[in-house]
Amino acid sequence: MVGVLALLPAIGHAHGLAGKRFFPATIVTDDPFVSDELSLPTISTSRSAEAPDEPLTRETSYALDFSKRITPDFGLSLGAEYLHLSPEGQPSSSGFNNIELGAKYQFYRNDRHETLLSAGVGWEVGGTGSKHVGADSFSTVTPTFFFGKGFGDLPDDASFWKPFAVTGTVGVAIPSRTSTMSTSIDPDTGATVTDVEPHPDVLQVGFSIQYSLMYLQQFVKDVGLSAPFDRMIPLVEVALERPLNRVNDRPTTGTINPGVIWAGRYVQFALEASIPINSRSGHGVGAQAQLHWFLDDLFPHSIGRPLIGQ
């Protein structure tokens, strides 16, 4: 208990805690907890997947995500993203992607086994973004299960494995429209051509593997780490997607994202590379960075506390 009390002033008291375990907010996979937090900004850059008759495109994203607890275990979220697309040999385009809304309920916490479980739903609001950057005119709803598990409950003879933790999400993105029909004129024949683009349900799986140097230093062994390394959490995130229906070709796409998080009391900073798992997922290595604000510690008596209950 003395160790816990020593750690809490350094990392905050409300967000992402299960026993002695602090789960940081991650960039690619959503958090397994509910809190008052703000990600501003999240910046990413990557190149599109190779496709016939389409140029390679550099996509740069600037995003904001805000989460607010309604009760200690239930919260709502709002996300906005501004995209800049730069196709090779063609003019660039910019605009906002669709707004994303979310709700999450943390229904289980086990301090002894450093475990958090939550369930939620995300809603990409169709038609709120710009067609210039490919924002869909239809909505997508994604029910999702979230989990976090630390390994501090391992036996003492495995003490250096205790700083490990995993977090993850499993969800299915369900579009409000099963397909979109469009028409065009064939320039050679002048005939009207009808094209039907299917919109499949998509399985989305993400997880992170983390090794907390804070946990190592505080609860396993003082190995003499000094700032800034004593607050770092090296990690690898993996994000995968696979269509489930309505299309014959159902490739798995995704990225592997190695990086590091530095976590302070009021803010954390994350930096990751983004490596496509195959040619369908992207071209070359991208990068992403996030500045994340713990509103529950910055403003514990106002916007950083639940609206109902405490």
Image (tube, rainbow, N blue to C red):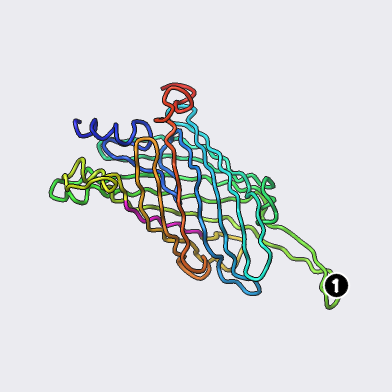
Image vertical order of residue 278 relative to residue 166, above or below: below
Secondary structure state at the residue bearing disc 1: loop
Residue drawn where x is 57% and y is 40% of the image: 101
Quarter-wise, where is residue 145 in the image? top left
Q: Nearer the viewer, residue 102 or 132?
A: 132
The secondary structure that dominates the magenta segment is strand
Label 1 sits on residue? 191
Within the magenta stretch, is there residue 99? no
Residue drawn where x is 34% and y is 31% of the image: 13
Q: Which residue, as the protein is rendered here, is positioned at the far right?
A: 190
Looking at the rendered image, the quarter that the C terminus falls into is top left
Q: Position of residue 33 (x, y in %)?
A: 41, 38
First to last magenta residue range: 234-241
Within the magenta stretch, is there residue 236? yes
Q: Position of residue 98 (x, y in %)?
A: 63, 47
Q: Position of residue 233 (x, y in %)?
A: 31, 49
Query: Within 10 Å of the Cα at label 1, are there few (<14), some (14-19), or many (20+) other Cα atoms?
Result: few
Task: Check disc 1 and give the amino acid type.
Answer: Ala
Q: Which residue, as the protein is rendered here, is positioned at the far left?
A: 157
Quarter-wise, where is residue 3 in the image? top left
Residue drawn where x is 67% and y is 58% of the image: 93
Residue drawn where x is 31% and y is 48% of the image: 232
Q: How many marks?
A: 1
Q: Position of residue 23 (x, y in %)?
A: 35, 42
Instruction: Answer left or right for 163 relative to 193.
Output: left
